[in-house]
Amino acid sequence: MSNDEKLTGDLFEVDKRLGLKPVVDFNNYLRMAFGDGQCTCIRCVETAGDQTDYEYQHTFNLDGQVLNRRFASTAGSDVLMVLKKAWLSYSKAELEVYGNLALDTVKEFVEPQLHKRLQPLFLASGLVKDVDGNLQLQQQLAA
């Protein structure tokens, strides 16, 4: 095999861990965690979308696309459950549920077009808190 053939072959080689069911499920979960358009919950309707007093954001503008978080399926405990399964499947190690979340590692098993959804979902679900630019997992969810 020539060097050109080896290089071309490397370009098309896919990490087999990305096809594992928990990893695929996590990517699908990220796709379904948001609905199109602004949030239409009663609070958002009453405040005409003003979220300044909200602890957790409801509506997001991700690269010009307005999305709303689907509350029924995106509680912090739900997000943690699917994340832990994908993390274990991909890395063959348990997710450390205390301290900083290694977002770069999560991005390794998330489809690139879904990366922009990670931090908003993690923050809005209450799974993490931004502490000086680091995403810290919240201990009450990890218990």
Image: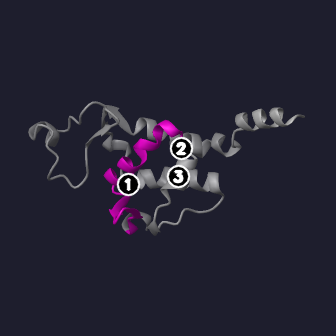
- With 98 as the anchor, is 52 left or right in this view? left
Identified by mark 3, the residue type is Val
Q: Quadrant of the N terminus?
A: top right
Task: Name which residue lies at 50% across and 52% down.
Answer: 83
Q: For the residue labelled by badge 1, is the local secondary structure a helix, a strand or a loop?
A: helix
Q: For the residue labelled by badge 3, is the local secondary structure a helix, a strand or a loop?
A: helix
Residue 106 has which mark?
A: 3
Q: Position of residue 61 (x, y in %)?
A: 29, 38
- With 90 as the anchor, is 143 left or right in this view? left
Tell me if label 2 and label 3 are in contact, CB under 8 Å. yes
Q: Residue placed farthest to the right in the image?
A: 1
Identified by mark 2, the residue type is Val
Q: Position of residue 15 (x, y in %)?
A: 69, 43
Q: For the residue labelled by badge 2, is the local secondary structure a helix, a strand or a loop?
A: loop
- With 107 as the anchor, is 70 left or right in this view? left
Q: Give the range drawn in magenta.
A: 110-139
Identified by mark 1, the residue type is Gly
**Which numbered mark, 1 or 3, is in the foreground of this view?**
3
Q: How crowded is mark 3: few (under 14 residues within 10 Å), some or many (20 or more)?
A: some
Residue 76 has which mark?
A: 1
Tell me if label 2 and label 1 are in contact, CB under 8 Å. no
Q: In which quarter of the image is the C terminus?
A: bottom left
Q: Does the magenta stretch include residue 6?
A: no
